[in-house]
Image (spheres, grey):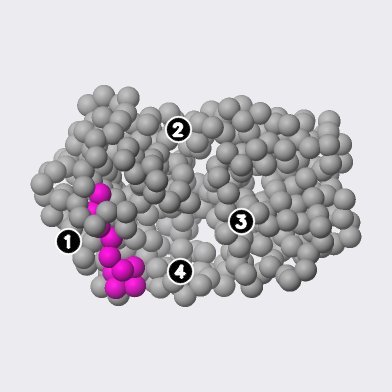
Amino acid sequence: MRVVLAADFPVHCLPGFEDSPVGHHATWLDPLARELASTPDLDLHWITCTKEVRSYQEVQHLDQTFHLLPRGRLSLEMLTRFRGERHQIATLTRRIAPDLFHGWGTEQGYALAANDFGKSSLISLQGILTAYCKASRMPLLARVQAHAEKSTLACATSLTVESPWGADQLKKLAPQARIHLLEYGVSPSCFDTPRHPDPQPRAIFVGSFNHLKGGDTLLRAFLDPRLAGVKLDIYGVADPSLVPVQLPSQIRFHGHRSRTEVLQAMSAAWCLVHPTRADTSPNAVKEARVIGLPVVTSSAGGQTQYVKHGGSGLIHAPDDIDSIIEGVLRLTASPEINQLMGSYDQEHCRKMLDTARTVENLIRIYGDVGEAWS
């Protein structure tokens, strides 16, 4: 089967582009490509629009072909519903002549390109922006993208989403489409990260620190005197409007850091805190559970399938400050309790989040979509 997979692949993972910027959100795509390299009878062509090239470039890597197209101004592309990128992708797709077109993410033009292809097409979602806008005060760009997402999903024939929570959202937005569950595996480096909790209780937050992810709720919880004895490390880009001018010494913003540094911090932490207001299946929670880190999180998202309340963590209602505090206090009460809850259901999570399983499910979905159009 020849497949076009159009996605924002992390270009820095390709040979010849090692010096390109690293801070890429779709961390699961490189492990996915590496696992797909061992898949027989699959001729895979990735298409990525990127500012790292000024003209078309083709890279052979992992027995796959990576087609890199120059990316124009995002504002212009959005105003024209990615007309320029869709034209480039369509021209290249005609040359490749795939059996199936797989567009990854509704934020860019890849999902629109999948709809353009028509017949055997599939769209995978990274997040459901429409649901996020209902749950949170999202920035203007995200609201514009969510508006476009609605019309894109209304024309979709087959979709993949990471969690039952996400599937429930899509049933409202795309009732005509076939919805497949496809959980994205986490980086192999997470499986090799042992836990070494610091002597002093320490909590960690990883991801975009904003209103949607409950950044304001997290700070309010840790500014409460009851958590004065627990340090909080925040990794990721922060919305400046949520960061107070002065913070107690136990709360530290580290900003964007390398993958190695973040995994070291997760290894040293006693728990991950993720008080999101809506989330399809946050990568940080999945990584924490693979490492064996217990989690305090909200009930608003697909992450709850990897956190067992009272077992591997605590689940609270969104914006419930007291429950967050109580959850962190319980997970930092003693090393023995922390270790027990961290290891609870860990092996099941590691099995579910192995990229090999993602590829197995993806190939099955490719077969289902192809048969539907045969």
Query: Which disc, if any, is residue 37?
Result: none
Gap in Å between the C-alphas at discs 2 and 4? 29 Å
Residue 305 position (above or below residue 176): above
Q: Earlier in the sequence, mark 2 or mark 4?
A: 4
x and y percent of residue 40 in the render?
26, 24
Q: What is the quadrant of the N terminus in the image?
A: top left
Gap in Å between the C-alphas at discs 4 and 1? 24 Å
Q: Nearer the viewer, mark 3 or mark 2?
A: 3
Residue pointed to by mark 2? 355
- Label 1 neighbourhood size at 10 Å, few (<14), some (14-19), many (20+)? few
x and y percent of residue 152 in the render?
31, 63
Residue pointed to by mark 1? 87
Q: Residue at x 35, y 51 (%)?
A: 8
Query: Which disc, if any, is residue 255?
Result: 3
Gap in Å between the C-alphas at discs 3 and 4? 21 Å
The amino acid pointed to by label 4 is Ala
Q: Earlier in the sequence, mark 3 or mark 4?
A: 4
* Front-lying residue, 325 or 249: 249
x and y percent of residue 285 in the render?
61, 45
Gap in Å between the C-alphas at discs 3 and 2? 27 Å
